[in-house]
Structure formats: C-alpha cells, structure tokens
Image: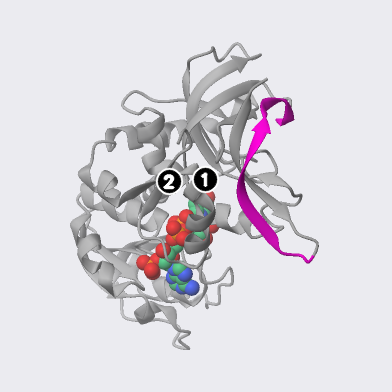
Amino acid sequence: MASYKAFYIQANDDGTFRRSIVQRDTGDLPQNEVLIRVRYSSLNFKDAMSAHGNSAVTRAFPHQGGIDAAGEVVESTSEAFSPGDKVIVTGYDLGMNTAGGLAQYIRVPAAWVLPCPRGLNPKRSMLFGTAGLTAQLCINKLVQMGVTPDSGQVLVTGATGGVGSIAVALLAHRGYEVVASSGKAEQAPMLREIGASEVIDRGELGEANRRPMLKERFAGAVDVVGGDTLANVIKSLQAGGSAACCGLVQSPALETTVLPFILRGVNLLGVDSVEIALAEKQAAWKQLARAAKLPAIERLNTTISLQQVPAALETLFRGGVVGHTLVNVGR
Ligand SMILES: NC(=O)c1ccc[n+]([C@@H]2O[C@H](COP(=O)([O-])OP(=O)(O)OC[C@H]3O[C@@H](n4cnc5c(N)ncnc54)[C@H](OP(=O)(O)O)[C@@H]3O)[C@@H](O)[C@H]2O)c1
C-alpha cells in the first residue's frame, strides 16, 4: 500500500461542498484490476460539476475527482497490462462514482484502460485529455456526414474552452475555415493564433430567436453550449450541413422546429466520449497522436499542480478558464 495525494470533494452538513488536496492510501481504492500511478490529468467542465456536488455526475461524497488520467501501470491482475505500461483512462465511471484521476493513484477495470498510442506519452495525451478526445469525435462525425474543408465555414462555440479550443486547433490543422464563437473578446488574438479565421461574439447566436430559420451560413458546427445557441446554430446551417452537439454549458434544453431538418436537410449529431466502445476511443487517440506536436496544442494548454486544482475548478465552473488545463499530479 502507498500513501498518495488526491483532489477530494467532501460534503458539508449545510449542503455545500469543500474541495481540497488530501493524503489517501491505495488501500482505499476500489478493488479493480489495474493500479495506475497517475502522472497527468486535465480539467473538464464535468470535474467542476462533480466538485460542486452535481448529483447527475457524482452521487456519493466524499469523492476523489478527475474524469481522465494518464500514467504507468503499477500492478495488474489482467494479462492485458504489465507494470510499467504507459496508459490512458478517460470516461466510463472514472471520476464520477469511481475514484478519479486528479490524484496520484487510481485503480480501474482493465476494460477502461488504453495503451498510450505511438506518438503520445502520459503528458502529451493529457494535453488533449477528455476535451481533445471529444473534439476529435465531433470532427469525425462531421467528416462522416461529408463536411470537408471545401464545404464552407465550420463554427465552434465555447471556443476558448477546453473542447472548443482544441476543436478550433484540430479543424484548422485539417484545413477547415473555422469561425470561433466566444464570450471573451480579449481572447480573439489567441483564437486566431490557434487557427480561427474569424471570431464572433457569443451573443450573436446566444439569444432566443423566434424565426424558424436564419440565413444559411455554416457547413458544420461543433457545439459545446446547447440551449438557444444550439437552436440558432441549427437554423444557420447550410442545406445538408451538420452540427455535432456535445455540451450544455448554456443549457441542456433545445427548442427548435423541424423546419431546418425538413427544408434544409440539416443533421444534428450527438457526441458521447464517455460510454463509447474502447476501440472507438483508441481510434480517436491514434488520430490525436498525429496532431500531438501541433504548436497550437502546446499554446492553448496551461499546466498546473494538484495543489492548484481547487481554485482552477472554481474558475472553470464560472466559464473563466481560457484553453485547456493540464494537471501535473506529481507536483
Ligand atoms: N459529450 C461528451 O462526451 C463531453 C465531453 C467533454 C465535455 N462535454 C461537455 O462539453 C461542454 C464543454 O466542456 P469543456 O470541458 O470544454 O468546458 P469549459 O472548458 O468550461 O468550456 C466551456 C466554454 O463555453 C463557454 N461558455 C461558458 N458559459 C457559457 C454560457 N452560459 N453560454 C455560452 N457559452 C458559455 C466559454 O467559452 P467562451 O467564453 O469562449 O464563449 C467556456 O470557456 C460541457 O457542457 C461538458 O460537459 C461533453
């Protein structure tokens, strides 16, 4: 057994939650097959929801947070893994109700574990993290529906966030003309630097609009925002265009008519990075490995220590983080 540091969420008697770094013991971890020494994790909106007691994410507290992790196998009762293997774990129940990756150790089922693909190591994989995996899955769905760089502009909403900023960088790298929608006007130079051709204010698409359709504009969209924004995105797609929907930072509600679907043949594509088959995750990680050395990916990441996680999650919860946050859990 080993003692280790973990980001821990505890419920107070008055219904509030406190977030701190505590010392735990590997004997406290669930009895799963693979014990992993975590080297890097990353911050995600879902981590902030769990840290604030959102029962749709985490039902029982106290809880060790963190929905992704990368590091080395220490012990494995599964023949699929040996000590020293470099591995990635994202999604499934990690960091929801299973002790998560914002900690120096996790113990998880072998069926959740992926070997780091060639071109990635634990640090490089968490420069993408769950956000990068989700951005890649969104792009894959758009490509499957025939959205190519020649089709026209592709919109990314919540563009300075984790999923959004990585989507901007990956799309631009593939030659797409990217329109970034953001509430942070001062970050327009950063968004252009990572590949956006144009930056629009999030207010342009963020208000409820009674018109059933708007001017045709985008060939595709990656939407992390939901709510009125997604409704307006759907109304602004070109005929045959597609929107990949993966988030709900504005609202989980979606109010629309069928008109864009039946008059313009547009497509709304749901994206889940959590429960999909491990093989699909593995294929997407191989794609990310090919983008691993993009300067834009380094540019949009900020590295923090485990000690800085509680404060950084507060900022993330309020929509104030710019780019993606890599967590060096060894520090
Ligand atoms: N489906 C999946 O598997 C999956 C995986 C990962 C994430 N997600 C979801 O995707 C969403 C984004 O996750 P993330 O980790 O990228 O979060 P994040 O880093 O907090 O980014 C969200 C961004 O959305 C914008 N935003 C915040 N509040 C907003 C509001 N009220 N209205 C409109 N825009 C707002 C902000 O960007 P600007 O200031 O630039 O506008 C913010 O940076 C979350 O809902 C998360 O749960 C889903």
The residue at 35%/63% (across/down) is: 159
- The image shows residue 105 at horizontal and vertical percentages of 59, 30
Q: Crowding at label 2, few (<14), some or many (≥20) Cα neighbours within 10 Å?
A: many
Q: Describe residue 288's horizontal placement relative to residue 106 as left or right.
A: left
The residue at 36%/62% (across/down) is: 221
> Do callouts 2 and 1 mark residues in contact (Cβ within 8 Å)?
yes
Does residue 262 appear anywhere in the picture? Answer: no
Q: Is the C-beta of the residue carrying label 1 under 8 Å from the nearest atom of ligand 1? A: yes
Q: Answer with mark 2 or mark 1, whichever residue precedes in sequence.
A: 2
- The image shows residue 162 at horizontal and vertical percentages of 40, 54
Return the residue at label 2. Answer: 137
Q: Describe residue 248's horizontal placement relative to residue 144 as left or right.
A: right
Q: Is the C-beta of the residue carrying label 2 under 8 Å from the nearest atom of ligand 1? A: yes
The residue at 51%/71% (across/down) is: 250
Q: How many marks?
A: 2
Quarter of the image for residue 215 reads bottom left
Colouring scheme, one of rainbow, by chain, secondary structure, one colour: one colour
Q: Describe residue 230's horizontal placement relative to residue 200 as left or right.
A: right
Residue type at numbered disc 1: Ser
Q: Quadrant of the N terminus?
A: top right
Return the residue at label 1. Answer: 273
What are the residue bounds of the magenta stretch? 14-30
